Image (tube, helix red, strand yellow):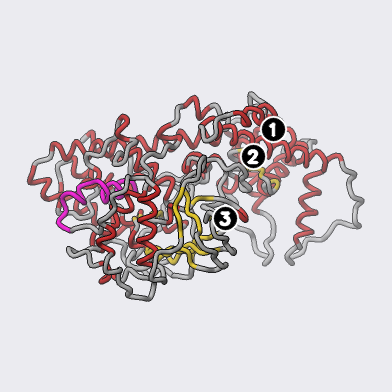
Amino acid sequence: RAAAVLLATLVASTSRLAPRRCAQPQAAAASGLSRGFSLNRLWDKNNNMARQGLGPMGSRRSLSPHAEEDAGAAAHAMGSTEAAQEFLDWLSLNFNDDDAPAPLLVQAPPGQPRGVYAQKPYKQGDVILRVPLKLGLFESEAGDLVRAAAAASRGSPAEAEDLARLERKRHAWSAPVLRSAREQAGGIDSAIWTGKLAGALLGQMYGRNQMDHEITMSKHWEMWRKSLPVSIQLPPTDWTDVEVYSSEIRELTTEYEFVRKLNNKVFDAVALLTKLYDEISSDELAKLETLRDFPGRGVAGSPVDGAEAAEPGGVAWALNIVSSRAFDERDQGHYLAPGIDLFNHDYGEAACARLDAEIGTALHDPYHGQVTVVADRDIDAGEEIKFTYNRLPSEVLLIYYGFVPEQNPYDDVVLFTDLVEALEFVYGGYLSPGDRQKAISYVLDTASGDISMEGTMIAKKTEEDFHRLKISNEGVDGRLIQALQISRVMMDKEESVGELLVKRITQKLRDFSTTLEQDESELASVEAGSRKEAILRLRVSKKRILLMAKMAIQGALQAPKPPPQGAAKAKSSSKPSAEEEDEDYEEVFLD
């Protein structure tokens, strides 16, 4: 009963600033087909993948005559470039349009991570690699180990079966889970999807799905497993508190604590499932084993403690693989696409490729759908092929992917986590609960009271609309300007929005124990690829954003104000131009 209570706490979905490797979705509407089937059903006893149409969309192209032989020949060391190359060749040979492996080379130049390089020129629009989504893993298809295990731990396998059935129905018909304001503050859309996909990954590559199940699994799982890194170290599982907190960046430490708690819940669930399998009677175990979607079969026995947990087959290893390699199609869920995870991330011109996904129905029915790496510009022979995972701030990339880019055009600095923090800053002190609620209501009512372009009232603003008020390389968040302007007028403050911003930026800079110059000096001498280098890169990026914004705002405040241009403009229902909107912001900013 105690185990059931503990496991029940894992059911609640949690949402934060979710990291997403986002493909560019193609037109594919939801078909309404049920998600309730097991990926095991993709493979029959003879591994006849051609029967399921695993070629490009719209074709029934079968595998090469030697595909099974090639798949079984993966004798290379796990994590090696040779194993990754063999898997990439197998994918391109069987699913690209050519009758030969794609001219792609997996290599790890000295001092650089493993990546995929072009061995011939590609023209813009050329297909580089095509992978059917049925080869991967889907969050929507991963069993809910929490509910099923909770029921089974009470000695009721029949109830576990009912819950597994209920979970499939819930996935097929339920609306997206509503997120609380507290959870939305971080901006990450993340439930325990990492645990669900990690369990599915362990089940397919290491668990009872392979050892005990009568269906012979496709050997592409073994090739995929061999292509994965032996070790991947992310802050939530491998870093110390001292290392993370040395960043002095609140958003990093908050997300770090959140993910660690989430991971600990997954560790606890796997430990309880292992205990269940060790103690349950043979009759009850036989009943559970009849549930093809029961996830305990795959994860029971997976290491959760010590060094083994971080090694292949361990829970920490699986969580890190999922975190750093999963893609997310907004409300459609997360998935893993084999082979696509071999490509590295970059921005701008360095990101010479893009990821296209035909996935509208894939997560309802993974028999359909594919992801394609496409040349986004002309690519020279010998050039590394990269695409942009997503437009994320650097602390999110560090927590979920394990790196901090040297230059991140999408990095930002959060000046206020929520509306309450902004209100108390403008007020200059603590607001009592009653005054706080009155101030929040005033700001939301004022922000919602403008007339929309069509002459109807804009939808009522909520506190969720004022989370993560930030500045970035692109400028000042418009919501931040609006919140400060309404607050200063309400509280009768003489300081302009610009002056308030300079004051807040100065506070944020003083929160650091070092200057930008000191960090840049240390960064130049630190060991490349070390955790210290990642922390220093993160601090340098944040400080540069703060200092550049401060200089730009101070320059605007000191510049002569433009003369008034006649009478005040009457409000119009016509849409203002971009120049007029900029002028309005500038007036608020300076006044």
Question: Dot 1 surroundings within 10 Å: few (below 14), some, or many (20 or more)?
Answer: some
Amino acid type for the residue under numbered disc 2: Ala
Q: Secondary structure at mark 2?
A: helix
Q: Secondary structure at mark 1?
A: helix
**Prevalent SS, magenta region:** helix
Residue 188 belongs to the span the image colors magenta? no
The image quarter in which residue 519 lies: top right
> 244 or 566, which is in the foreground?
244
**Whether label 2 touches label 1, CB < 8 Å:** yes
Amino acid type for the residue under numbered disc 3: Ala
Question: For mark 1, what is the residue?
Answer: 427
Q: What residue range appears in magenta?
A: 197-215
In this picture, residue 415 sits left or right of residue 283: right
Question: For mark 2, what is the residue?
Answer: 439
Q: Earlier in the sequence, mark 3 or mark 1?
A: 3
Question: Dot 2 surroundings within 10 Å: few (below 14), some, or many (20 or more)?
Answer: many
- Above or below for 568 versus 187: below
In this picture, residue 509 sits left or right of residue 291: right
Question: For mark 3, what is the residue?
Answer: 351
**Which label belongs to residue 496?**
none
Does the rendering let one see residue 533?
Answer: yes
Question: Dot 3 surroundings within 10 Å: few (below 14), some, or many (20 or more)?
Answer: some
Q: Residue at x 78, y 61 (%)?
A: 571
